[in-house]
Image (cartoon, helix red, strand yellow):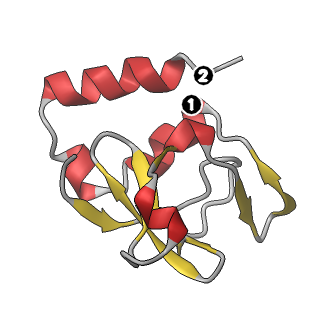
Amino acid sequence: MSEWEDFKTKCPSCDNTEIIYWTKDQCHLIINKEGYIKCNNSSCQHNQNPTFIMEYKFKCGKHEDYRKPNSTNVWAALGMISSIVNSSKTERKKLFFRINEYDD
């Protein structure tokens, strides 16, 4: 796995443009350039098994329910993550195809 950084971005599930630090069960979430999310606390259960962003559900101030992300909003959100923006063209292309596999 690659290095991790704060998952501070807009909602990957809707068009809400508010930029927030994402949390789950009071854990601070981090993301890597392969699009995996986990808790930053190494003793947390959410740290042990990173989840691919498209398999995660998000809840923000614009919607009170947890929603699956869609590729358009995910790419807008990931555009705020420096390790993804600065990854190689090949790495971004691989991530692009993986994300698009999830679109209905």
For mark 1, give the secondary structure: helix
Q: Residues within 10 Å of mark 2 (few under 14, many from 20)?
A: few
For residue 31, above or below residue 94: below
Residue lying farthest to the bottom in this orientation: 26
Give the amino acid type for the residue marked by disc 1 in the picture.
Ser
The front one of 96 and 52 is 52
- Picture coordinates of residue 16 (x, y %)? 68, 58
Residue lying farthest to the right in this orientation: 64
For residue 100, above or below residue 3: above
For mark 2, give the secondary structure: loop
* Residue 102 in the figure: left or right of residue 4: right
Residue denoted by label 2: 102
- Picture residue at 38% right of the left edge, 74% below the top: 40
Q: Earlier in the sequence, mark 2 or mark 1?
A: 1
Residue denoted by label 1: 71
Kindly indicate whether the residue at mark 1 contacts the one at mark 2 (C-beta within 8 angstroms): yes
For residue 84, above or below residue 18: above
Give the amino acid type for the residue marked by disc 2 in the picture.
Tyr
- Picture coordinates of residue 50 (x, y %)? 44, 51
The front one of 20 and 36 is 36
- Picture residue at 31% right of the left edge, 39% below the top: 34
- Picture residue at 16% right of the left edge, 40% below the top: 87
